[in-house]
Amino acid sequence: MFENSKRGEGVYKKDYGSDDIYNLYKNEIKKIAVTEKELDSLLVDKKLFRTICDEFNKLLIDEILINSEEMRLPYRLGVVRIKKSKMKYDDKNKLKIDWAASKKLGKRIYHLNDHTGGYKYRFYWTKGIVKNITAYSFIPTRTNTRRLASILKDKNRQLDYFM
């Protein structure tokens, strides 16, 4: 179906990726290792390094999503958390459209968030005090936003996030 179509460039560009971080890690280990034996004991391969980073990130996101914690970023970069805010129903242009229900009924249906008591939730980054902070942005992954939605829809969980 899509054999001949090319994907366009992504909307979000990454400046640094896991390869860059691994190379930085290797260079730092080489600086502190005194002997070759010490270097071999401190240095892990790329696959293990990636696994460690992935598991660490999962633990951080679990603390934010499941335990309603804030993640304080180093170097005064700020705080990442889930923000809860009351929905405003007075302007229909600001409400999100429920496309599946709209298509089924033939008219526009809006998400009213009845399952959350009229509150909407999102990842929020309170920016810290750093030069050129406007150049930074925080965009959560689709997996994590979907996970937040499933947690909110689960009636067995009683979580409350910050306003």
Image (tube, grey):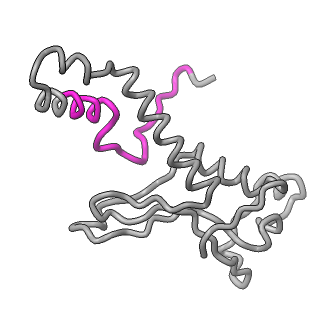
Q: Viewer-proximal residue, 125 or 58?
A: 58
**What's the residue at 16%, 30% (across, down)?**
27
- What's the magenta region? 3-26
The stretch drawn in magenta includes residue 75? no
Q: Viewer-proximal residue, 137 or 22?
A: 22
**Does 7 appear above or below 123?**
above
Answer with the quarter of the image where residue 128 lies: bottom left
**What's the residue at 46%, 58% (across, down)?**
71
**What's the residue at 18%, 20% (across, down)?**
38
Residue 101 pos. (x, y %): 84, 56
The stretch drawn in magenta includes residue 13? yes
Asked whether the viewer can see residue 120, the reply is yes
**What's the residue at 77%, 61% (across, down)?**
158
Answer with the quarter of the image where residue 19 lies: top left
Residue 33 pos. (x, y %): 14, 26
Q: Main secondary structure of the magenta part?
A: loop
